[in-house]
């Protein structure tokens, strides 16, 4: 994994409409992030249905491994064209960002993709080709860490038209604002919201069109290694701690005995906090050079629960902090010891029934389901 794309998005419905006529779908796997943006013709319920069908079909096909060319061809042949306006009933923009750094885009009646590199807006190179009798813009380029890609519906380019901006914001106007907003807005979600707020202001808080923004901020992956449970054999303590410390990224230790092993092997002090942020979760500890030290089973199971619900409390207890660090990481290694803690279960039970091992497997499965690259190393 060389690059990761953080995605932020937001929409405004046309004034007087309850539903937005734009639709965004995001498809992720271990190798790429794909964003699909569709803009239904008109506004309201009809536009929402058209855009949703288009985006869902495209995203579903892509998730099943259908090539981008085939997806665009299928949509181009499926979408009817308005006889009066000679426009498709839905537009379609598909952007793929691979972990290798390659980005591909295909646009069917959609605004261009904006690329911001080193705080300057540069053109995303595309060429025109015919797919299923329709003109499609397609392009590809190699991304670098720090690049920002912005997809918009035409409501963004039309912002202010006939009012504050007689001809609307337009591509040049948006590019100018992006060069100002991107350097001071590092978060993809906040950047998308800032662009929406700008458009809403130009529309004088009454959008004249459905308006959608999708931001992809490309960065290097975040690594994390979590060490929980003593190794099955005490003779493996030194080697296990050495491998743990040589792992890249942030380091988390979960478990009192595990923490004592790490502190002993590193020759560093282990201290424990005296305050409880959550009375049900034991307090955290500190080892110099380790990002987080917590209790084991209670903390891990509560962190797993937070990850499953997607609601992580903004608290300083161990479970909340472990869940936040795991949620922020892209590539995670879990070093799990197979030594049985008699306090948790009968030590005569088979290793396969190790409660810690079961929790680790559930945690790894949940993280993988959320798109993280997870490796479990038993010791």
Image (cartoon, helix red, strand yellow):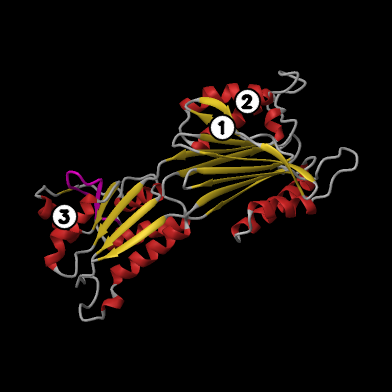
Residue identified by numbered label 1: 115
Quadrant position of the C terminus in the picture: bottom left
Q: Is residue 285 magenta?
A: yes
Q: Secondary structure at mark 3?
A: helix
Disc marking residue 262: 3
Residue drawn at x 30%, y 77% is 352
Residue closest to the far right: 84
- How many residues crowd around disc 1 within 10 Å: few (fewer than 14), some, or many (20 or more)? many
Q: Is residue 369 magenta?
A: no
Residue drawn at x 19%, y 73% is 342
Gap in angstroms between the C-alphas marked 3 and 1:
45 Å
State the image quarter where residue 186 is shown.
top left
Q: Position of residue 68 (x, y in %)?
A: 64, 52
Disc marking residue 124: none
On the picture, is 203 further left or further right than 184?
A: right
Residue identified by numbered label 2: 174
Gap in angstroms between the C-alphas marked 3 and 2:
52 Å
- How many residues crowd around disc 2 within 10 Å: few (fewer than 14), some, or many (20 or more)? some
On the picture, is 176 further left or further right than 285?
A: right
On the picture, is 175 further left or further right than 107?
A: left
Q: Secondary structure at mark 2?
A: helix
Q: Position of residue 344 (x, y in %)?
A: 24, 71
Q: Where does the magenta region start and end?
A: 281-294
Q: Main secondary structure of the magenta part?
A: loop
Q: Position of residue 234 (x, y in %)?
A: 12, 67
């Amino acid at each position: 994994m060389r690059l990761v794309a953080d995605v932020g998005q937001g929409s405004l419905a046309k004034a007087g409409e309850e539903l937005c006529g734009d639709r965004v779908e995001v498809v992720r796997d271990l190798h790429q992030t794909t964003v699909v943006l569709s803009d239904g013709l008109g506004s309201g319920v009809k536009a929402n249905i058209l855009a949703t069908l288009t985006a869902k079909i495209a995203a579903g096909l892509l998730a099943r491994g259908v090539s981008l060319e085939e997806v665009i061809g299928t949509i181009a042949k499926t979408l009817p064209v308005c006889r009066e306006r000679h426009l498709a009933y839905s537009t379609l923009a598909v952007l793929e960002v691979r972990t290798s750094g390659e980005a591909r885009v295909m646009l069917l009646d959609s605004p261009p993709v904006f690329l911001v590199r080193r705080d300057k807006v540069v053109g995303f190179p595309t060429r025109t080709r015919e797919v299923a009798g329709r003109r499609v813009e397609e392009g590809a380029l190699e991304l670098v860490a720090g690049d920002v890609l912005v997809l918009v519906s035409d409501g963004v380019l039309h912002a202010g038209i006939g009012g504050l901006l007689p001809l609307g914001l337009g591509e040049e106007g948006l590019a100018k604002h992006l060069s100002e907003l991107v350097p001071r807005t590092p978060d993809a979600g906040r950047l998308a919201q800032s662009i929406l707020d700008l458009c809403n202001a130009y529309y004088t808080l009454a959008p004249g069109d459905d308006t959608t923004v999708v931001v992809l901020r490309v960065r290097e992956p975040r690594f994390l290694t979590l060490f929980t449970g003593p190794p099955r054999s005490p003779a493996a303590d030194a080697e296990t701690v050495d491998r743990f410390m040589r792992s890249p990224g942030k380091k988390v230790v979960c478990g009192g005995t595990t923490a004592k092993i790490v502190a002993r092997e590193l020759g560093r002090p282990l201290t424990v906090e005296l305050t409880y942020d959550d009375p049900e979760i034991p307090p955290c500890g500190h080892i110099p050079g380790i990002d987080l030290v917590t209790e084991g089973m209670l903390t891990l199971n509560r962190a797993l629960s937070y990850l499953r619900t997607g609601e992580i409390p903004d608290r300083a207890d161990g479970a909340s902090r472990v869940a936040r660090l795991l949620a922020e990481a892209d590539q995670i290694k879990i070093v799990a010891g197979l030594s049985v803690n008699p306090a948790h279960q009968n030590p005569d039970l088979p290793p396969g029934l190790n409660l810690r091992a079961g929790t680790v497997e559930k945690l790894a499965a949940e993280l993988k389901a959320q798109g993280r690259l997870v490796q479990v190393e038993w010791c």
